Image: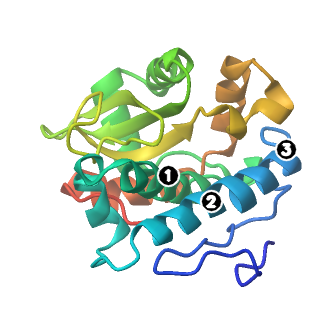
Amino acid sequence: LRDATAADAPKGPFLLPTLPYDYKALEPAIDEATMKFHHDKHFNAYSTNLNKALEGKEVSSIVDLQKGAIKAGGAIRNNGGGYYNHGMFFESMTSPAKSGAPSPALAKAIDASFGSMDEMKAKFNDAAAKRFGSGWAWLGVTPDGKLAITSTPNQDNPLMEGAEGDKMIPFLGLDVWEHAYYLKYQNLRPSYIKEWWTVVNWAKVSEYYEKYASQGKPVTWG
């Protein structure tokens, strides 16, 4: 695994988390080369640039930073969003053998809101595939306590005031920027989306749902 104390590691309050699994762990869904670029270069850049943008400023938690990120300007919006989104993304995946299934509580919520797991996946896949350009697809809890799916552009997320899409507390997100899949899938984003489900860490996602989102609290990862 990557050494988070390497010379190019970011300096500041928001450090680059070490991957909780080996670079090869998500194969064949996500290849080793993509994981190295995505985590060590892209995630690292968001971390480094966020710390630079916050130099001399009072620093809140990464969760607290999301709410006013859009108003705070591009550097905080893009890098603060990128840091939060990627932290959740990498932590919510695992090897295909360990993917598992949603907890009873989450499974019940999925059935209540979508009718079935397959219906939820179909709606999620559609949102992810139709997100024009770069962005994210999200599964989250709306203010009325139901589950819903939305998507956001670039590094925005539903915690940001003024973000495009439905208001919710996201607890599962899929990165559909080309850097997340292009080495293996080229322009075949739907194929990437389909295979990604095989590496969702349902134990972690269920924890996000039960401990945070279902309680009206933004997910704190790490």
Cα separation, mark 3 vs mark 2, equals 20 Å
**Extreme residue toward the front, this view:** 56
Q: Amino acid at mark 3?
A: Asp
Label 2 vs 1, first from the N-terminus: 2
- Residue designated by label 2: 45
Q: Amino acid at mark 1?
A: Gly
**Where does residue 20 sit, x and y in percent of width and height?**
68, 68
- Residue designated by label 1: 82
Q: Amino acid at mark 2?
A: Ala
- Residue designated by label 3: 31
Is residue 96 shown above or below 150?
Answer: below
What secondary structure is marked by label 3?
A: loop
Mark 3 Cα shell of 10 Å, populated few (<14), some (14-19), many (≥20)? some
Q: What residue is at 68 percent from the left and 31 percent from the top?
A: 178
**Is residue 189 visible to us here?**
yes
What secondary structure is marked by label 2?
A: helix
Residue 34 in the figure: left or right of residue 175: right
Residue 81 in the figure: left or right of residue 130: left
For the N terminus, the quadrant is: bottom right
Mark 1 Cα shell of 10 Å, populated few (<14), some (14-19), many (≥20)? many
